[in-house]
Amino acid sequence: MIQQQTILKVADNSGAKTVKCIKVLNGFNRRFAVLGDTIIVSVQKLRNKARSTSKVQKGEVHKAIILRTKSKTVKKDGTTFFFQSNVVSLINKQGKPIASRIIGPIPKLLKKKKNLKFVTLSSGFI
């Protein structure tokens, strides 16, 4: 579960390393975001090698989709899964990813939430 002021890692090649959640979207006074939700983030740190070729700058505000969370997620068959860190991928205003690659696996749950572009960019599923 992600809320305001949460520091998140970025799992794509947009140039950002860490971001901070500013607002959780989809509902008035909504407090938490879960896997597959859209949030508004501010870029906190950039990757060292990508500072000159970065697609984003420090302090910029972007939308992001949550790809992995530390909190447990329960599947329909009763099994649970969780990840080691909270990870997002940056998107533009039209909902398309800024980056051209996503590092690490993403859950199959994102296939059903109409985020097929992220499915094609990722390396695998869980």
Image: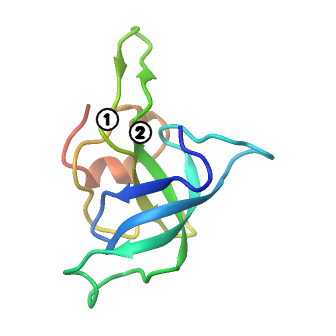
Percent from the top left, x then y, of residue 18? 39, 64
- Whole-percent x, y for residue 98 in the image: 40, 70
Mark 2 touching mark 1, by CB under 8 A?
yes
Crowding at mark 1 (Cα within 10 Å: few <14, some 14-19, many 20+): some
View extreme (bottom): residue: 52
Horizontal relation, residue 64 to residue 27: left or right: left
Q: Secondary structure at mark 2?
A: loop
**Identity of the residue drawn at 27% across and 91% down:** 52
Q: Badge 1 is on which residue?
A: 83
What residue type is disc 1 on?
A: Phe
Of 50 and 77, which appears nearest the observer? Answer: 50
Residue furthest out toward the top: 78
Q: Position of residue 99 (x, y in %)?
A: 33, 68
Hey, what amino acid is under mark 2?
Thr
Query: 79 or 77: nearer the eye?
Result: 79
Residue at the (36%, 81%) spot, across then down: 55
Q: Where is mark 2, residue-wise?
A: 69
Residue 29 vertical position relative to residue 45 in the rendered view, above or below: above
* Residue 29 seen in this snapshot: yes
x, y percentage for residue 17? 33, 67
